[in-house]
Image (spheres, rainbow, N blue to C red):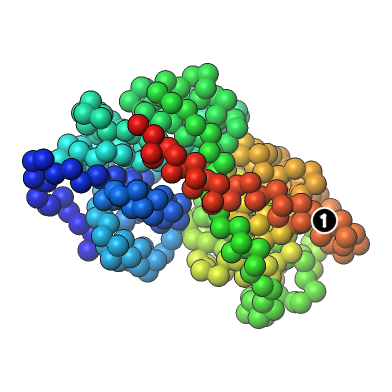
Amino acid sequence: MVNKIKRKTAKKGNTEKKAFITATVASMIDLFNMDNIGILKELGYKVDIAANFKQGNVTDLERLRDFKLKMQEQGVEVYHVPIPRDIFCARDILKSYRILKKLCDRERYSIVHTQTPIGGVVTRFACRNIRKSGTRVIYVAHGFHFFKGAPIKNWLLIYPIEWLSSFITDVLVTINREDYAFAKRHMKAKKLVYLPGAGIDVKKYENAVYNVKLREDLGIAKDAFVLIHVAEFSLNKNQKTVIQAIERLKNTNIVYVMCGIGEEKENLEEYVRSHKLQETVKFTGYREDIPELLKSADAFIFASYREGLSVALMEAMAAGMPVICSCIRGNIDLIKSQGGILVNPYSVDEFAEAINRMYHMFTEQKELFCRMGEFNQKRVRKFGKNIVNDKMRDIYMER
């Protein structure tokens, strides 16, 4: 069970160092903050975490249960807070603020590390009182929702809230160059830091092996050209554009494999069924064997409208895959012409053309195709977890 806020107040004079990590949803902490929890524990901190464990997560319930148990076994206190992913869910936002404020006022954390738009805003406002007593509030922006080409509503609603929140932020961390440049001009945090992503285990993906059985399990021919995509199924991830591009090509030797879960999955499955694309578009569901799946595919495709600095994209690069991806913030920090093809995320035609071009490289220019993957594998090493972890350790240690 996730702990409710019932622990006794620490005794007066207790000098235990405490750190608090929050996010909108628990899967964000599970997927992107395990190393941060480890670093804080190494530095002598007692760590608590808080997020929504019930709604909005991009991993399945079994993994969330395992995550809670693992944290509790490590002595990490786990709190469920009903932080919503929808900015208009005012009741849950207010309830979350009250829970977090009560917890922060009582525990008096030395470090609060928060992230994600709604979770990050709610947490920072909940920490206003304890900042006066020396608490450092660190906000990691995994991609501002206002960016070049973002909907006007994002600028009207989200930007003012983030700008106001920056006044009560001690360290603002951005993970791509566009956000860093924008924050340097407009945000008011005490300190601004550029971090090269969330960090990935490069060796894990470099050393994964091809598994022919994975293709057999999915009903894919050995000689098929397999495009793979690993992401939450959502409107932002834009999987439908790729499906329509595959449909337009009418090449049964090109197969699109999608790994993940999410709110748009049923709609996409229905589109595939109704358009009779089951042979060329495959759904794997949530998978734990992503490194092997990547190695068993040929190229990675990624059509998002918005990213910070995609971990899934970096993992594909570490696996040595050529890439087709949307030409957007974050992606352009990672993918250069030597390693892939950048495409307008709104254009089915451009995706179809890029897929066809990549397919012909795969079948007719194998050496060039392989060089693209090798280029990506070398390039992504500068975004490895060791580099990112060293920078995060420095941020935590600063006073």
* Picture quarter with the N terminus: bottom left
In the rendering, at what x and y percent does residue 120 appear?
36, 37
| Total marks in image | 1
Q: In the rendered view, would you say 194 is above or below 63?
A: above
Q: Position of residue 76 (x, y in %)?
A: 27, 57
Residue tagged by mark 1? 371
Residue furthest toward the right? Answer: 364
> In the rendered image, is residue 8 in sight?
yes
Residue 111 image position (x, y, % from top left): 31, 39
Number of other residues with Cα within 10 Å of mark 1, as a class: few under 14, some 14 to 19, many 20 or more = some
Q: Residue at x 66, y 50 (%)?
A: 380
- Relative to 263, 161 lies left or right: left
Looking at the image, is 177 positioned above or below residue 13?
A: above
Relative to 217, is 164 above or below? above
Q: Secondary structure at mark 1?
A: helix
Which is more toward the observer, 73 or 308? 73
In the figure, residue 53 lies in which quadrant?
bottom left
Residue lying at 41% horizontally and 24% vertically, measured from the top left: 189
- Whether residue 267 sits left or right of residue 371 in the image: it is left
Q: Residue at x 54, y 52 (%)?
A: 385
Q: Decide if residue 341 is on the left or right side of residue 257.
A: right
Residue closer to the observer: 209 or 267: 209
Camera-nearest residue between 251 and 95: 95
Is residue 346 in sight in this rendering? no
Question: Residue flagged by tag 1: what amino acid is it?
Answer: Arg
Q: Quadrant of the C terminus?
A: top left
Image point (49%, 41%), residue name: 391
Place residue 364 in its image quadrant.
bottom right
